[in-house]
Image (tube, grey):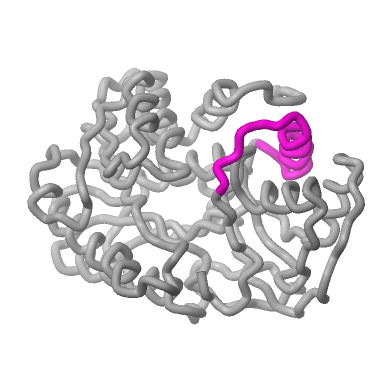
Amino acid sequence: MLPSRLESTEQLDDLLSEPTAAVVETMRQLEGDLILLGVGGKMGPTLARMALKASRQAGRERRVIGVSRFSDPATRTKLEAWGIETRQADLLDESAVAALPDVPNVLFMTGMKFGASGNSSMTWAMNTYAPAVAARRYANSRIAAFSTGNVYPLVPVTGGGSVESDPLQPLGEYAMSVLGRERIFDHFSRTQPTPMTLIRMNYACELRYGVLVDLAQKVWTETPIDLGMGMFNVIWQGDANAMALAALGQCQSPPAILNVAGPELLSVRRVAEQFAARLDKPLTLTGEEASAALLNNGQEGHRRYGYPRVPVQQLIAWIADWIAHGGETLGKPTKFEVTDGRF
């Protein structure tokens, strides 16, 4: 049973890290330890905690190791309190990566999106060179690597969204660099060979960040909302965590491809109207909905690993309540409304 409201960040983190049956079964079947490269980001901490919970529920004793630069020391403290081992390392530093523990299971989560338009060289280094370093270091492991739905083109809003077999047409330098990440992993998967899964995410959301939080905050502050990117996907971050971990069990060479997205194609206009009604705020909309948007079809992931546990209406209700009561947010807008690929 889902709670009607979430009272604290502790309760939120607990719920985000609750494993599904598919994750528990994956952790039961996998041998050996797990390392998460780039654990300090938005998804990393609760994903690492879910892996540890699922391993214990499966009766598997394994080390779960989180690697990051840990620019925010509080993240490292939280992880260690949960029982996650931590290592501080720059994933662009080959010697630092070489010194990391040998493990058979790797989740690659690091990357650069925001600021990409103003720092192209670092964007390409993080999104293509760091994957090469990791792929060579863990040639004998299985690797599930995060990608993004931005590698797909804008597609008609009247369709069901891009599926895993669709042609890739990245828009903008960030999306091109992430396609570069996929190509690098694909190369090493084929030549070493290393079993891999590439996870195209679009978009994970919880109460502190995500597309729904962006919209709720704009409604709360009575900021006009642009309708140019008129449709979008979201998936509860706890469900995205679960699919990413379960995907470790189906790595292959050449890499398996998995879209991670919610089941609905959501209207910016309709969701903004719902937040305005829940928050008792006036709503200002600008522009008009385009006939195309960045949309992923996540049905294959649902078929493999189970339907998302948190429906979007529940997530909207939680977020509206959270924003109205001054709940913590991360201050990291998704910029989902960008239509020219410039982040």
List x then y, in percent, for residue 293: 67, 73
List x then y, in percent, for residue 117: 44, 74
Residue 325: in magenta span: yes
Q: With respect to residue 341, does 137 lie above or below?
A: above
Quadrant housing the N terminus: top right
List x then y, in percent, for residue 40: 37, 41
> Exactly how many numbered labels are in the figure?
0
Residue 272: in magenta span: no
List x then y, in percent, for residue 265: 72, 60
Q: Residue at x 29, y 36 (%)?
A: 66
Residue 340 in the figure: left or right of residue 68 = right
Instruction: Between residue 33 and residue 205, name the one nearer to us.
Output: 205
Q: Residue at x 51, y 79 (%)?
A: 171
Instruction: Between residue 299 and residue 199, name the one nearer to us.
Output: 199
Residue 210 in the figure: left or right of residue 291 = left
Res 129 quadrant in image = bottom left
Q: Residue at x 67, y 52 (%)?
A: 214
Q: With respect to residue 187, does 5 lie above or below?
A: above
- The answer to whether any part of residue 31 appears in the image is no
Q: Which residues are magenta?
A: 310-331
Q: Residue at x 55, y 50 (%)?
A: 332
- The answer to whether any part of residue 84 appears in the image is yes
Instruction: Between residue 290 and residue 208, name the one nearer to us.
Output: 208
Res 252 quadrant in image = bottom left
Q: With respect to residue 34, does 334 lie above or below?
A: below
